């Protein structure tokens, strides 16, 4: 069975993940690659409902532990119903956020021990780990505020600067701890420069895993 390739994009809110996924998906499609784009939380009917509950800016406060289970419930759905079937049929799956978001937001920023998060992540993902992960790193909190300013902030974006600093620091730790999988990219670079770095890495993984057949 030819297995597809699974690539995740991670980073703080407002770091430019959606733009990069869109640009990369276009490039891959132009090159004849069968691509599926998805996001978390969401990507299934159930997941989109959970997303509404989690991000509603008027919604109730909740513990990090409650969040951990809700994000994980949405993840279990998308992994089993969407991502695994797509990978089994050899597609390239690009996801905006995956289990690393839980490690960083509910773990490093939310205070749940990382071993607990790892256990739950492993169950919710059926052990699936991305082949490649890009972390778009925003080193200046003002960029975060400027980029989000035009739209209403969701429940998580409304949290204070200390929470978002822990998120950023968490992503840096994640990248340091997983150098074989995670690429940390300066999100303040021009989008075309970021795309070039992303593409370099993606084509390399495609070549390595598919022996060039995907190109
Ligand atoms: P976004 O799709 O606009 O990035 O919003 C998703 C928000 O949910 C974002 O603030 C990060 C947060 N989040 C978590 O806290 N834990 C998770 O596991 C995931 C997937 C997202």
Image (cartoon, grey):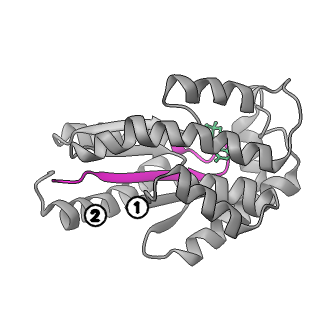
Q: Is residue 16 left or right of residue 90?
A: right
Q: Which residue is mark 2?
A: 205
Give whichever of 146, 81 is nearer the camera: 81
Residue visible at 78% across and 61% down in the picture: 112
Boundaries of the magenta span: 1-17
Q: The residue tagged with tag 1: helix, strand or loop?
A: strand
Q: Is residue 62 left or right of residue 196?
A: right
Classed neighbour count for the residue bearing mark 2: other residues with Cα under 10 Å, few (<14), some (14–19), many (≥20)? some
- Beta carbon at label 2 within 8 Å of ligand 1: no
Residue 12 sits inside the magenta stretch: yes
Residue visible at 78% across and 43% down in the picture: 66
- Does the CB distance between marks 2 and 1 fall below 8 Å? yes
Q: Which residue is mark 1?
A: 132
Numbered circles on residues, count: 2
Q: Is residue 42 left or right of residue 114?
A: left
Rendered position, 3 above or below 69:
below
Q: Is residue 203 left or right of residue 107?
A: left
Q: Is residue 41 shown to the viewer in this render? A: yes
Image coords of residue 52 (percent x, y): 68, 25
Give whichever of 105, 74 is nearer the camera: 74
Rendered position, 193 above or below 181:
above
Residue 26 sits inside the magenta stretch: no
Image coords of residue 136 (percent x, y): 56, 56
Residue visible at 25% across and 43% down in the picture: 91
Instruction: Name the image quarter holding residue 203.
Output: bottom left
Residue visible at 54% across and 50% down in the picture: 124
Q: Earlier in the sequence, mark 2 or mark 1?
A: 1
């Amino acid at each position: 069975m030819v297995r597809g390739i699974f690539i995740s994009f991670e980073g703080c809110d407002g770091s430019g993940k959606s733009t990069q996924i869109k640009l990369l998906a276009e490039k891959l499609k132009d090159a004849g690659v069968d691509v599926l784009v998805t996001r978390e939380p969401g990507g299934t009917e159930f997941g989109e409902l959970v997303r509404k509950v989690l991000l509603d800016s008027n919604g109730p406060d909740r513990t990090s532990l409650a969040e951990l289970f809700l994000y994980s419930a949405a993840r279990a759905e998308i992994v089993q119903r969407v991502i695994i079937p797509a990978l089994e049929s050899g597609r390239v799956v690009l996801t905006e956020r995956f289990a690393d978001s839980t490690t960083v937001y509910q773990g490093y920023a939310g205070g749940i021990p990382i071993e607990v998060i790892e256990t739950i992540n492993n169950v919710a993902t059926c052990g699936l780990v991305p082949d490649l992960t890009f972390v778009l790193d925003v080193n200046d909190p003002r960029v975060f505020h400027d980029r989000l300013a035009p739209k209403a902030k969701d429940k998580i974006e409304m949290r204070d600067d200390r929470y978002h600093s822990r998120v950023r620091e968490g992503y840096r730790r994640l990248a340091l701890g997983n150098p074989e999988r995670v690429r940390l990219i300066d999100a303040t670079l021009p989008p075309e420069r970021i795309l070039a770095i992303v593409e370099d890495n993606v084509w390399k993984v495609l070549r390595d895993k598919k022996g060039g057949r995907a190109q």
